[in-house]
Each structure stands twice: as structure tokens, then as C-alpha cells.
Image (spheres, grey):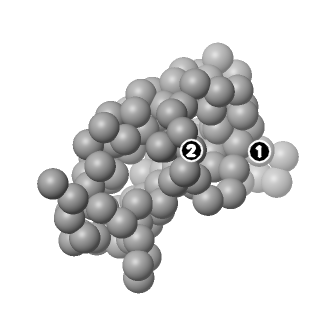
Amino acid sequence: MATTDLTTVYAALRQILARHTDGLLVQHDDDTQFYVDTHHVQPNKKPLFFGAVQRKKAMVAFHLMPVYLQPALLASISPALTARMQGKSCFNFKTLEPALFEELDRLTQSARASYRAQGFVD
């Protein structure tokens, strides 16, 4: 059953990202934002962004930077998840969507593995 309670949607998406943050830097964690960086320092002296979940006014955004750096990660995602994309690395949700959330969890796992293969994550 779909729900429009953004607090519930945020909690579910936050849980997905949190499952994949061992060894990463949680920079922000509150009721509206969960923001995670890697320990890899870029030439600009800032850590490489991994992902974030942000509760906005009308939706919840799930950002996953590895798919921006490695677009091939998106090759096997479903049309339904593709329809949730905003830009190159953000997925927007207004309701709980268990099947899409499971797919997003698998994509996040693949994204972390991609960062690991590139030496950005231990």
C-alpha cells in the first residue's frame, strides 16, 4: 500500500543507504538529511561524495554519486526506477515502493562495489 507520509519514505530510504556505509564518513544525520562521503580526498581537498537521502517539501531524494561516475551501473535498472530519476544520480520518491526500494538497495550495493574497485572505498 502506498503512503504519502514523507517521514516514512525518508526513514525507508535512509535505512537503505545506511546499510552500505560501513567505513564511510557520515557527515550529516538528522530527520531531513543523511549525507555520506568516502575517505578518499579529491584534488580539491574535499572527500568524495558517496550518497545522501534528503527529505524535501514534496518528495524524498536519494542521491547516489557512483552512478554518475559509472553510468554503466544504471544499464540494468528497471524502467520504473529509471522513471524516478532526476538528473544523473538522483532518484525521487513520494510514496513507499517496496519493489523499487529493493532494486535501489541492490543498486547501492553495486555502487559501493564500484567505488571499492576504483579504490575510493576500503
- Which badge, 2 or 1, is on the more N-terminal residue? 1
What residue does disc 1 label?
Answer: 42
Q: Which residue is drawn at 25% across and 70% down?
A: 4
Q: Position of residue 112 (x, y in %)?
A: 52, 29
The quarter of the rendered structure image containing the N terminus is bottom left
Q: Specify whether 108 is left or right of 38.
A: left
24 w.r.t. 29: above or below: above
Q: Where is residue 96 in the image (x, y as percent from the top left)?
A: 26, 55
Query: In the image shown, does 90 or 84 lie closer to the viewer?
Result: 84
Determine the secondary structure under disc 2: helix
Q: How far apart are marks 2 and 1 (CA)?
A: 29 Å
Q: Which residue is drawn at 40% across and 60% down?
A: 93
> What label does residue 82 carry, if any?
2
Tell me if mark 1 has few (under 14), some (14-19) or many (20+) residues whose alpha carbon lies within 10 angstroms of its own. Answer: few
Q: Where is residue 114 in the image (x, y as percent from the top left)?
A: 61, 23
Q: Specify whether 7 is left or right of 85.
A: left
Q: What residue type is labelled 1?
A: Gln
Q: Specify whether 83 is left or right of 5.
A: right
Q: Where is residue 81 in the image (x, y as percent from the top left)?
A: 49, 43
Tell me if mark 2 has few (under 14), some (14-19) or many (20+) residues whose alpha carbon lies within 10 angstroms of its own. Answer: some
26 w.r.t. 24: above or below: below
Q: Which amino acid does label 2 sit on?
A: Thr
